[in-house]
Image (cartoon, rainbow, N blue to C red):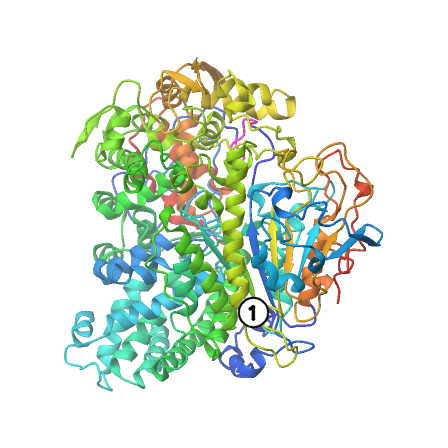
């Protein structure tokens, strides 16, 4: 929901964002058994409670709906990437319905989504059983059966159901399941075996246990449920890959998935390309890269080149973010300060003043990490000026530190849009907005937006470096000096790099990353019960007395901790 | 808000002691003839919202003052003139291509909404009210959803179609959750809509029919399992609500799969169209053709169309910086031309859509599919001319929803009077912005719902008359007691047949 007022020092989980965090230890790295009796018992490791957290602060068990990306990834992982490529049109027809900031935050399913999923399931299953070769690829017992045969043996059907049931439903198949899916097989098998297998697979692909992560778990007392090894594996695959567990992870789950194994699996999974895709999705949403604009016709006349530049602007941000976390074990500060970039588009290279390269390049000193990249700072072109939109940048940065501001009251809009140079001739965009929003009702938020957006003023509308702001025929100096409220303190900054440095050394910045990661993982807005989870992650990312942890290590420590495996009964 | 005259599917499913006993056979209780039954007078009616955005200029949209000088006061606060009595084109935008529909449409004037005129709120179909004492979250869904849920024996599914370059197409369809949260329903790209509606629709193919039945059986069986899962004690009430939504949609799908559509043909498959701005015309045409086919094939009775003109007016296409929205905030000649061009572009597709619906002959009404429909052209922002209302030399570039762009086409199966230019201004004036204070926008929405057969209890909250707040509370220059809100449960004057 839209917050009702400007920043009051309280984060969205209802905790004082300015309060200093206290020391906490890292999670256990020595492994341990899995049969603890509650989060307070601490028998399988040394999962400490961050200050202010109590053992009862455990999120409620909740269904998590598979999003569209996860659906496609899971199909690719279960049946092979070739299937996804061949059926791309059908699979892309499943509409996106996320309602929150992150694509994992889904509202109730729409009819269009449910019908598209059923159609996709049917299409996938039909494709997988289209001929004898396809059938033979599904199971070792099927090569002996021609597609038009009217019978397969009961053991073959049972094996097929157990095998694909485990992969699709992400849990072992029960006797009840066997009976139920045998009946689904019969729906098609009345025609022939191929259709029987198709209806069996279709039934699995529209099963709630495929489309939702559902927790049965093990009751360990005090109203706490511990995820089963298979549920843990499913959650791990969703969080790290936005997909289903692969064979190795399922085998580990079959073996009980003790903490050492879980850590090894998490390490392996973060080394896998699928982690890059999932993490890229997170950053795409967090940094609002959907808003990367096209260059104007005047700047780049060629439509393909315009599209290529837009893609490169976004992709370059994602490549940097994922490489920093997954390849170089970077910290939150590295995300904000590292000048490494990956640039494969000539127009983007020109924009940055570097050469196109197959590998990493270093950006000029007027750039730093995420907040200084063209894909992040570019705003829609404004007529008659080269300036970027200071307020849109301010709003984006507000979200980046988890201090979203309320939508403006449209009735209070000035007659002339201050973004337009015509609204204040011979004034820069900052001055125009300052004049237009000086009344108290506007100023309370706009002062903050101005403070966050102003330091980026040397980046033009497309994110290019500009020395002066062109307003019609005039060239005006760019005023980037601003005061920003961070960790309850006012910090003076006068450049994008200085702003990045201030955020990098803050606690509020890493806290927002932790909050965003948790929100992305849980697929919903956070509540009070999630505060400890966020704080634990945040403490690792920010470091306190210790050096900050790399984002990668913090993630791994988190997924092997009890915080990841415990939920509260409804 | 639920219509008490009909037992909801959810109530049916969950009212059996938790067991989903009846699902496998319920579809057989709703044979094709009943599922497609026509309510009351037996006429199958359709509702279509054609959304334009960013406001319009009265000097392009409305007839000139001279053209409607013959208007007469027919009721307090209502002036009327037959559209056929306007010489030449109705207006610059409602040109001669609208002549075939003149007698079958109504052009409304001085309809005001006084709440927050916000692009982001998709307000065109929503009774938004920003009023002290009224919890916005308690308001019901947008009228397309209310109509889809409450107007037909078998609830329909709104088809929201859109084009946009970004990841999610937009629509103006808004639903509310049980907790009062507003959810803007996504629009479907043409390719998504085609795949959702027409992939299996091959009515002459015996094999395809057999596979449809197979799919229906699987959905039927899956529904039973969803019921079992729903009753698992590990699930919270919120989780149960989530699964209930899923079950409802699967149940509707099962019904859809049991239908045999007639007199319809699938549109051309648009899945090869890209999302590049340059494909905008092909995608717009695909939206029109899909909407027409969906209505002709009786796959839905509620359609939302939103051809986002920020795609149309990108610099890539027309050299206009800032897109349609940017141009709409600009009053120079180039921007005015661009806005006019954008609206003319819409009108081209609108008349194509209307023509393609203007087919068939209903034996009950003698009317065409269009005649049996109500097409509402709407816009979340109003007339951007200044006080004069429609003078080209008085461009105000405001951001208000006063004197809105509203055109109603079709008689909704004989329930609406048509053929009029209806000016709902009062005698009260403002100091600036639209000269005359007008009549409540929400009354138009109420009129649409009534014409479609929705009863007031479907949209009223806690028994309070009105759909949302009928006045709004914004814009201090409009004294609220001077706004005409009607008696909240009837048609706008002069519209009921």
Relative to A193, does residue B447 appear above or below in the rendering?
Answer: above
Estimate the x, y position of residue A406 in percent, counting from the top left: 57, 34
Residue at the spot x=39%, y=77% of the render? Answer: B202
Point out the stretch of residues depicted in magenta: A7-15
Estimate the x, y position of residue B10 in percent, counting from the top left: 58, 68
Kindly identify which residue carries mark 1.
Answer: B358
Indicate yes or no whether the magenta region holds residue B30: no
Q: Nearer the viewer, residue B30 or B450?
A: B450
Estimate the x, y position of residue B473 in percent, counting from the top left: 73, 39
Quarter where residue A462 is shown = top left
Answer left or right for A330 relative to B332: left
Estimate the x, y position of residue B274 in percent, counting from the top left: 34, 53
Answer left or right for A213 relative to A407: left
Q: Hey, which residue is sitting farthest right in the picture?
A: B76
Relative to A533, does residue B6 appear above or below in the rendering?
Answer: below
Q: Hey, which residue is sitting farthest front in the picture?
A: B87
Answer left or right for B345 relative to B198: right
Quarter where residue B320 is shown = top left
Q: Nearer the viewer, residue B197 or A335?
A: B197
Indicate yes or no whether the magenta region holds residue A12: yes
Answer left or right for A335 relative to A486: left
Determine if residue B62 is in view.
Answer: yes
Magenta region's main secondary structure? loop
């Amino acid at each position: 929901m839209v917050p009702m007022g400007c920043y009051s020092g309280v984060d969205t989980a209802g905790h004082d964002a300015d309060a200093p965090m206290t020391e906490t230890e890292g999670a256990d790295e020595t492994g341990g058994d899995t049969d603890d009796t509650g989060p307070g018992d601490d028998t399988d490791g040394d999962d400490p409670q961050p200050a202010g957290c109590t053992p009862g602060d455990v999120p409620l068990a909740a269904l998590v709906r598979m999003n569209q990306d996860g659906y496609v990834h899971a199909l690719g992982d279960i049946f092979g990437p070739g299937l996804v490529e061949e059926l791309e049109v059908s699979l892309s027809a499943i509409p996106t319905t996320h309602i929150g900031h992150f694509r994992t935050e889904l509202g109730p399913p729409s009819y269009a989504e449910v019908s598209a999923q059923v159609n996709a399931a049917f299409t996938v299953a039909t494709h997988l059983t289209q001929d004898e070769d396809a059938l033979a690829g599904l199971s070792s017992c099927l090569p002996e059966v021609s597609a038009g045969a009217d019978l397969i043996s009961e053991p073959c059907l049972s094996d097929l159901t157990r095998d694909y049931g485990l992969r699709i439903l992400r849990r072992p198949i029960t006797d009840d399941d066997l009976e139920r899916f045998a009946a689904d097989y019969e729906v098609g098998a009345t025609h022939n075996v191929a259709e029987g297998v198709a209806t069996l697979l279709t039934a699995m692909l529209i099963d709630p246990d495929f489309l939702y992560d559902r927790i049965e778990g093990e009751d360990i007392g005090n109203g706490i449920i511990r995820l089963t090894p298979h549920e843990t594996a499913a959650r791990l695959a969703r969080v790290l890959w936005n997909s289903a567990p692969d064979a190795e992870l399922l085998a580990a789950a079959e073996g009980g998935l003790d903490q050492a194994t879980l850590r090894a699996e998490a390490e392996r999974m973060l080394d896998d390309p699928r982690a890059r895709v999932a993490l890229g999705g997170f950053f795409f949403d967090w940094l609002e890269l959907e808003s990367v604009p096209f260059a104007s016709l005047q700047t780049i006349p060629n439509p393909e080149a315009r599209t290529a530049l837009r893609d490169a602007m976004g992709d370059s941000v994602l490549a940097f973010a994922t490489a920093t976390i997954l390849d170089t074990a970077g910290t939150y500060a590295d995300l904000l300060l590292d000048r490494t970039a990956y640039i494969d588009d000539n127009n983007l290279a020109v924009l940055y003043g570097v050469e196109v390269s197959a590998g990493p390049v270093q950006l000029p000193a007027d750039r730093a990490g995420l907040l200084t990249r063209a894909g992040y700072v570019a705003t829609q072109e404004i007529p008659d000026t080269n300036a970027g939109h200071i307020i849109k940048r301010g709003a984006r940065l507000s979200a980046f530190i988890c201090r979203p501001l309320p939508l403006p009251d449209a009735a209070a809009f000035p007659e002339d849009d201050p973004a337009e140079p015509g609204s204040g001739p011979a004034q820069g965009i900052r001055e125009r907005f300052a004049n237009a929003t000086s009344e108290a009702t506007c100023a309370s938020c706009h002062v903050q937006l101005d403070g966050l957006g102003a330091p980026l003023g040397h980046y033009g509308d497309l994110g290019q470096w500009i020395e002066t702001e062109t307003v019609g025929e005039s060239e005006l100096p760019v005023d980037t000096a601003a005061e920003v409220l961070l960790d309850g303190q006012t910090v003076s900054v006068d450049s994008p790099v200085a702003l990045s440095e201030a955020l990098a050394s803050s606690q509020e910045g890493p806290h927002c990353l932790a909050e965003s990661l948790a929100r992305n993982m849980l697929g919903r807005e956070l509540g009070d019960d999630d505060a400890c989870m966020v704080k634990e992650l945040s403490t690792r990312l920010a470091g306190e007395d210790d050096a900050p942890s790399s984002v990668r290590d913090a993630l791994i420590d988190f997924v092997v901790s009890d915080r990841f495996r415990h939920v509260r009964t409804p | 808000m639920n219509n008490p005259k009909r037992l909801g599917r959810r109530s049916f499913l969950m009212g059996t002691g938790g067991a989903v006993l009846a699902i496998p056979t319920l579809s057989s209780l709703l044979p094709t003839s009943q599922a497609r039954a026509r309510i009351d007078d037996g006429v199958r009616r359709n509702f279509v919202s054609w959304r334009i955005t960013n406001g319009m200029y009265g000097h392009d949209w409305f007839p000139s003052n001279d053209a409607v000088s013959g208007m007469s006061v027919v009721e307090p606060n209502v002036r009327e003139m037959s559209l056929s009595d306007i010489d030449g084109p109705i207006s610059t935008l409602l040109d001669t291509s609208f002549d075939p529909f003149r007698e079958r449409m109504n052009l409304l004037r001085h309809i005001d909404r006084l709440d927050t005129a916000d692009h982001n709120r998709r307000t065109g179909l929503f009774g938004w009210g920003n009023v002290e004492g009224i919890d916005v979250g308690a308001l019901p869904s947008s009228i397309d959803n209310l109509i889809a849920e409450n107007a037909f024996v078998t609830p329909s599914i709104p088809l929201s179609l859109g084009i946009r370059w970004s990841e999610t197409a937009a629509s103006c369809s808004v639903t509310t959750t049980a907790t009062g949260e507003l959810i803007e329903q996504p629009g479907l790209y043409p390719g998504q809509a085609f795949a959702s509606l027409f992939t299996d629709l091959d009515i002459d193919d015996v094999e395809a029919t057999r596979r449809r039945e197979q799919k229906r059986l699987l959905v039927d069986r899956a529904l039973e399992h969803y019921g079992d899962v729903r009753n698992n004690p590990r699930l919270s009430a919120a989780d149960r609500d989530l699964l209930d939504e899923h079950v409802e949609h699967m149940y509707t799908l099962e019904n859809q799969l049991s239908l045999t559509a007639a007199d319809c043909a699938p549109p051309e498959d648009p899945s090869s169209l890209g999302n590049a701005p340059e494909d905008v015309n092909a995608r717009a045409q695909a939206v029109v053709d899909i909407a027409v086919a969906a209505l002709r094939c009786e796959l839905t009775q509620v359609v939302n169309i939103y051809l986002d003109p920020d795609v149309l007016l990108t610099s890539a296409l027309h050299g206009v910086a800032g897109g349609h929205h940017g141009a709409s905030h600009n009053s120079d000649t180039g921007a005015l031309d661009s806005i006019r061009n954008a609206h003319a572009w819409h009108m081209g597709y609108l008349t194509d859509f209307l023509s393609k619906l203007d087919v068939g002959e209903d034996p009950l009404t003698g009317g065409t599919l269009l005649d049996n429909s109500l097409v509402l052209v709407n816009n979340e922002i109003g007339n951007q001319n200044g006080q004069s209302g429609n003078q080209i030399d008085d461009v105000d570039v405001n951001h208000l929803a006063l004197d809105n762009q509203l055109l109603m086409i079709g008689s909704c199966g004989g329930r609406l009077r048509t053929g009029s230019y209806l000016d709902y201004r009062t005698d009260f004036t403002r100091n600036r912005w639209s000269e005359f204070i007008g009549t409540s926008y929400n009354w138009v929405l109420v009129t649409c719902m009534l014409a479609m057969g929705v009863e007031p209890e479907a949209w009223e909250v806690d028994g309070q008359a009105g759909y949302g707040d009928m006045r709004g509370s914004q814009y201090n220059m409009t004294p609220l007691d001077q706004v005409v809100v009607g008696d909240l449960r009837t048609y706008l004057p002069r519209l009921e047949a």
